[in-house]
Every structure is written in structure tokens, then in C-alpha cells.
Image (cartoon, grey):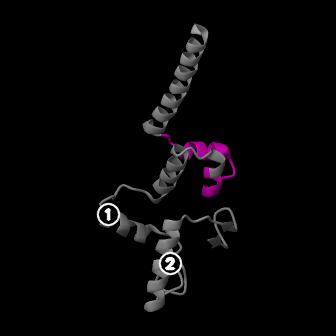
Amino acid sequence: MFLPDSKTGKKTITLNAPAAGILAKLKIKADQEYVSEFVFYGADPEVPRSDLKKPWAAVTKLAGLKSLRIHDLRHSFASVGAGAGLGLPIVGKLLGHTQASTTQRYAHLDVDPLRRAADAIGATIVAALESKSIGEAS
């Protein structure tokens, strides 16, 4: 997806398949009942919305997630990527960050990836020690 104007200027966004699929369905609906070429438009369908406050309020109310901020989605995206073992440079690039320190603030690791990492390191150490002990006994 190409954004001709963003907070940091022109930007290409790499959409994941589920997001692209949702946008494609919205486009089909828009073509059937032509409303607008924009996913979010204001009073004039020919002009994109300048903010997402009203649509976001409707989405969170419908989902029962009134305290969820739209920015929380970026944090969740970064945390899932970091938890899956993707490097911070990749996650940062996907988020449009230019500084690794910004991505670090976004990528909150939950306990599960930390536990998996600790278990993997521990298992490697134990295997090395057992291998050494077996080799010494021969």
C-alpha cells in the first residue's frame, strides 16, 4: 500500500495477507454500492477522513473494547513480531520506525517467548553437559 502523505512523508506499507483481504472485500462492497474509493471517508465520499476518531469509537464500542486505543494495535503488532523471533530491525521497518530505540519501546515481550528462550538455552546447556559427561566416561 502506498501512502502519498504520512507523518513522515511518502511511505510504502507492507500489508499482511489478512489485512489485504479485508481491504479487498471492502473494495468489492464499495464497487457494488459505489460509495467512495476511500476506506474511511467523511461527509464528502470523495475526500478521505482527516482522522479516525469516530470510526474507531464505533469499532471499539461494537467490540466491547472501549479503552482500546488505535495506537495499541501498533504495540500489539510489534510485540507479536518480536515474540515470534523477528528481529527489531524488521519489526521497526514494518512500523516505519527509523530508530531501533523506538521499536524497542513498542515491542513488549510477554512471558511465553521469554520462557521459550530460557528453556531453549537451558536445554542446550544441559545437552552439552550431558554430552561432555558421556564423552568423559568413555
Q: Determine crowd level at label 1: few under 14, some 14-19, many 20+ residues with C-alpha closer than 10 A.
A: few
Pinpoint residue 3: horizontal percent, then vertical percent: 64, 71
The answer to whether residue 92 is seen in the rendering is yes
Residue 7 belongs to the span the image colors magenta:
no
Of circles 1 and 2, the one toward us is 2
Element on which disc 2 rests: helix
Name the amino acid, label 1.
Answer: Ala
In the rendered image, the vertical position of residue 72 relative to residue 21, given as above or below: above
- Name the disc covering residue 24, or none: 2
Q: Residue furthest front?
A: 138
Query: How busy is the neighbourhood of tag 2: few (under 14 within 10 Å), some, or many (20 plus)?
Result: few
Find disc 1 in the rendering and name its residue. Answer: 63
> Mark 1 or mark 2: which comes first in sequence?
2
Q: Is residue 135 left or right of residue 57?
A: right
Q: Quadrant of residue 104?
A: top right
The disc placed on residue 15 is: none
Residue name at image x 47 percent, y 84 percent: 28
Magenta stretch secondary structure, dominant:
helix
Bounds of the magenta segment: 91-109
